[in-house]
Amino acid sequence: MTVMSSNDIKYRRSPRTSHLPQKHDDYELLEVGFNGASFSGAVFNLSTTIVGAGIMALPSTVKQLGLIPGGFWRTLLQICIVINNLGMLIVYMIIIGDVLSGTWSDGVRHSGVMEEWFDEHWWTTRCSLLLFTTVFVFAPLISFKRVDSLRYTSALSVGLAVVFVAITAGVTVVKLIEGTIGMPRLMPEVVDQTSFWKLFTTVPIIVTAYICHHNVHPIENELKDHTHMKSIVRTSLTLCSSVYIATSFFGVLLFGDKTLDDVLANFDGDLGVPYSSLLDDVVRVSYGVHLMLVFPIVFFSLRLNLDELLFPFATPIAYDNRRFFLITLALMGFIFLGANFVPNIWDAFQFTGATAAIAVGFIFPAAIALRDMHGIATKNDRRASWVLILLAVSSSTAAICSDIYSIFTSDSGIKS
């Protein structure tokens, strides 16, 4: 008969309890002297969770829409979080691979910075560069057991996102002054049934861009003062919305109908301004590094939720080094393979955004309000929840049908 140690008994959980430590003292075994996360650290961590790869696909989304329109539940929620985060992390690695080793889009080759700097070698291939990034960048960052340990890298990642926006805006303003930018499309271009249904594929992109729900509780759990969480969420959303709006506006204004699914791929040629080549490299490298720093913050909640699904009765993963290492290794292996075989970010965004992201961002919050265990929901709250669920399900269904339809029509076009 196995005898449990006192520590195992203390931290063992039932399937109804949270897989997060319930108070700050629980972390004393992991790091002595931790008195709780700060307001700024929490803002940067939550903002980094939001501003990930979605920013790169938003200009393409606005290009399609035009500038103007521009228990059971717990297990299912965790499954959706796992699917959503896996898809997002694969997207991050795809973009990092595009930045470093290049990509193909509509039959055109867009070179990566490593190829441009050092020519083509075995170590500048996509697989080699992603493997190097995984071992020497991701591995150290995902080894932290507290989300607050990533506050400095999160602050740097937000700063790098702002650098990208500033350069894009600066180039756009210069070209506007020179009169070399045409009038962008203000409304979506709907010419047939295919183009109409294609509009719905933009919904998952927009939804995914604002998904941060999976890290709200881990971040709140480490706060010194839990009453600050509402202000932290509002500050993060304001900051990220500003970055998103600026990126979408200036990106589609600068590249117009030539805006690619991953707008970073547009920064591989002459921008029509002085020091164009240098600006191209700064934009791509800075945002590539930004995604490397976003990766561990999203990976944190992915590992947490997968562990809860697989081992609901075990001690928290933070106190089991063997389980922590094995789950981390398995997830990184899957993400690495996905990044090497998924064609582009639009494919990954469409399906994860149309399913898991919509469920996490809209359906589950509305369902919680309808359940109303504490009896605090008003009639307006319940009405709004039903509307939210209806819109989420309908838009998700339309987006998935549109994705499937576009796949079959493109295949038919190739065969004919």
Image: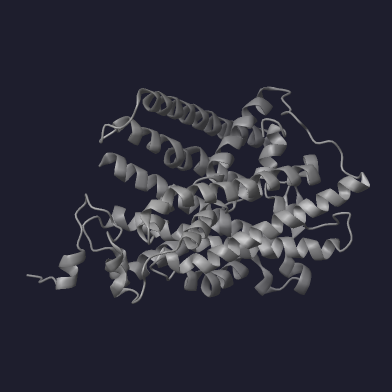
Find residue 310 and report its image quarter.
bottom left
Percent position of residue 320, x then y: 28, 70
Q: Is residue 162 visible?
A: yes
Percent position of residue 197, x then y: 62, 27
42 to 416, vertically: above or below = below
Q: Quadrant of the N terminus?
A: bottom left
The residue depicted at 65 percent of the width and 44 percent of the height is 58
The residue depicted at 87 percent of the width and 45 percent of the height is 176
The residue depicted at 27 percent of the width and 67 percent of the height is 26
Q: Residue furthest bottom?
A: 32
Q: Residue furthest left?
A: 1
Q: Is residue 61 left or right of residue 238?
A: right
Find residue 275 and report its image quarter.
bottom right
117 to 107, vertically: above or below = below
Q: Is residue 120 left or right of residue 41?
A: right
Q: Is residue 22 left or right of residue 78?
A: left
Seen from the viewer's position, the closer of residues 138 and 122 is 138
Q: Is residue 158 left or right of residue 9?
A: right
Colour approach in the figure: one colour
Q: Is residue 344 visible?
A: no
Seen from the viewer's position, the closer of residues 132 and 142 is 142
Q: How many marks?
A: 0
Q: Quadrant of the C terminus?
A: top right
Percent position of residue 161, x then y: 65, 58
Seen from the viewer's position, the closer of residues 101 and 14 is 14
Percent position of residue 369, x then y: 35, 33
366 to 253, vertically: above or below = above
